[in-house]
């Protein structure tokens, strides 16, 4: 028996059972960036606590009695036995619909879904329930223990993650050394990660670990495009972050870090929107000597060897390229054939830009043309140990 104000279960508690309201009503609330947010009021005949049991995660909300309540509780162990006896219940439409509605309700506290608020009469706003319900069917809760790795750099991108509660660390290896890493970012409640691999269709560029017990909402890749169509502004937000990271990468590349930022907007951010991600397998040729070239490349991850055939027909090893090295600049400036072949020694993730797109940027930063012509001259005059491109 609970009286008004009694807390039946707390958000982030370990799930210990399923509750059924025999008499009375309860308020369901969850933490948000603006404090505690009311999600729903449940009346006589309602179940609560099923999400945490089914997803084997912590409680996603706090449940408080708003009047005198009588509830029945099925302990976690008995719930597990019950599903063992009636496994069809977990797969039933009634149960799946309940989980979907509860998941949809919990999305109200997460900032990225604030765009689903629509104006009602006067200053009042209300969530688009139909879209929340569709999202509730796409997202699943996933419990991650402190210290566990969610994904590693180089893994295939298969999902987007949103932190419901907890915190995670984003890190990257130093010069490919898995024993040495640097922390790139700390993520907390409401933050998301994993979108870069899905947007660029490339492998994971960093490793993410839970630094505390963390509850995630997981969106599988197959639902990503539907997610973007349902959440206004999400694609723009993801693209802006992707372009920001690309611009940061460009700022570390010789010649690009000489761009004069004298505009009210960032030129490198604009240039970043013109680049595309590409992936190549071990042994795959990125470009071949003698072919027409129309792209310039920057290595984000991996190694590639540069070779050329000398005038007497003998193959010559010119150099090995790694992270942040660039090649193919001649193709940006002249309508000519490739002067060397570049082959992947490992799996490689690259940024590429076409001659057409690069020409657009040169109109904004004409001094960059001088830098690349100097690079061409330097490489053309080097010994065979350095590639022309």
Image: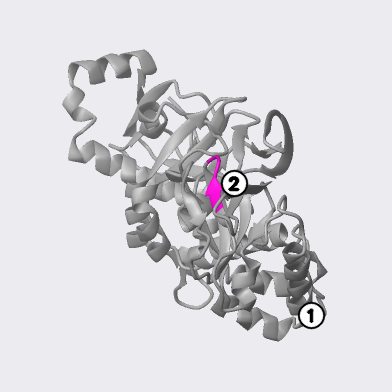
At a point 78% along the width and 78% down the height, the residue shown is 370
Q: How many marks?
A: 2
At a point 79% along the width and 80% down the height, the residue shown is 367
Front one among 48 and 104: 104
- Tell me which secondary structure the magenta stretch mostly adopts: strand
Task: Tell me the residue that label 2 is attached to.
Answer: 304
Where does the magenta region start and end?
A: 342-346
Q: Is residue 238 above or below residue 223?
A: below
Between circles 1 and 2, the one closer to the viewer is 2
At a point 38% along the width and 18% down the height, the residue shown is 76
Asked where in the image residue 140 lies, by quadrant, the reply is top left
At a point 64% along the width and 37% down the height, the residue shown is 167
Label 1 Cα crowd, 10 Å radius (few <14 / some 14-19 / many 20+)? some
Q: Quadrant of the C terminus?
A: bottom right
Residue 243: give x, y in percent of width and height.
61, 64
Front one among 369 and 248: 369
Residue 308: give x, y in percent of width and height.
59, 54
Q: Is residue 218 above or below residue 3?
A: below
Task: Tell me the residue that label 1 is attached to.
Answer: 367
Question: Is 343 one of the magenta-colored residues?
Answer: yes
Q: Is residue 125 above or below residue 227?
A: below
Front one among 284 and 104: 284
Residue 297: give x, y in percent of width and height.
60, 61
Left or right: 147 in relation to 129: right
Say which element carries label 2: strand
Looking at the image, is mark 1 or mark 2 earlier in the sequence?
2
Say which element carries label 1: helix
Residue 111: give x, y in percent of width and height.
56, 56
User: Is residue 101 in view?
Assistant: yes
Q: Quadrant of the N terminus?
A: top left
Front one among 41 and 288: 288
């Amino acid at each position: 028996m609970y009286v008004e104000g009694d807390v039946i279960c707390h958000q982030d508690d370990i799930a210990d059972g399923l509750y059924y309201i025999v008499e009375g009503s309860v308020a369901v609330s969850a933490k948000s960036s603006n404090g505690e947010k009311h999600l729903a009021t449940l009346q006589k005949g309602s179940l609560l606590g099923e999400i945490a049991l089914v997803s084997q995660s912590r409680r996603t909300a706090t449940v408080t009695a708003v009047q005198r309540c009588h509830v029945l509780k099925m302990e976690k162990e008995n719930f597990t036995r019950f599903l063992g006896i009636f496994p069809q219940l977990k797969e039933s439409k009634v149960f799946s619909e309940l989980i979907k509605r509860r998941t949809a309700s919990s999305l109200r506290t997460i900032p990225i879904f604030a765009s689903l608020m629509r104006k009602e009469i006067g200053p009042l706003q209300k969530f688009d329930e139909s879209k929340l319900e569709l999202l509730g069917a796409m997202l699943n809760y996933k419990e991650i223990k402190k210290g566990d790795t969610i994904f590693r750099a180089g893994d295939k991108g298969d999902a987007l993650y949103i932190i419901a509660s907890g915190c995670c660390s984003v890190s990257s290896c130093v010069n490919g050394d898995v024993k040495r890493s640097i922390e790139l970012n700390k993520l907390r409640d409401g933050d998301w990660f994993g979108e870069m691999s899905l947007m660029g269709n490339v492998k994971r560029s960093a490793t993410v670990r839970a630094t505390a017990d963390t509850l995630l909402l997981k969106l599988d890749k197959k639902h990503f495009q539907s997610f973007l169509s349902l959440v206004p502004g999400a694609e723009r937000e993801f693209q802006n972050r992707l372009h920001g990271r690309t611009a940061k990468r460009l700022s570390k590349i010789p010649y690009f870090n000489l761009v004069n930022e004298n505009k009210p907007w960032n030129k490198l951010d604009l240039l970043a929107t013109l680049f595309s991600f590409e992936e190549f397998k071990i042994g795959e040729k990125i470009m071949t000597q003698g072919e027409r070239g129309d792209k310039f490349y920057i290595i984000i991850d991996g190694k590639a060897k540069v070779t050329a055939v000398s005038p007497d027909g003998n193959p010559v090893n010119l150099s090995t390229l790694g992270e942040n090295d660039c090649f193919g600049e001649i193709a940006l400036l002249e309508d000519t054939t490739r002067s060397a072949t570049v082959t992947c020694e490992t799996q490689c993730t690259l940024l590429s830009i076409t001659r057409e797109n690069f020409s657009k940027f040169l109109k904004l930063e004409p001094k960059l043309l001088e830098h690349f012509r100097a690079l061409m001259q330097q490489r053309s005059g080097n010994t065979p140990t350095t590639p022309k491109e």
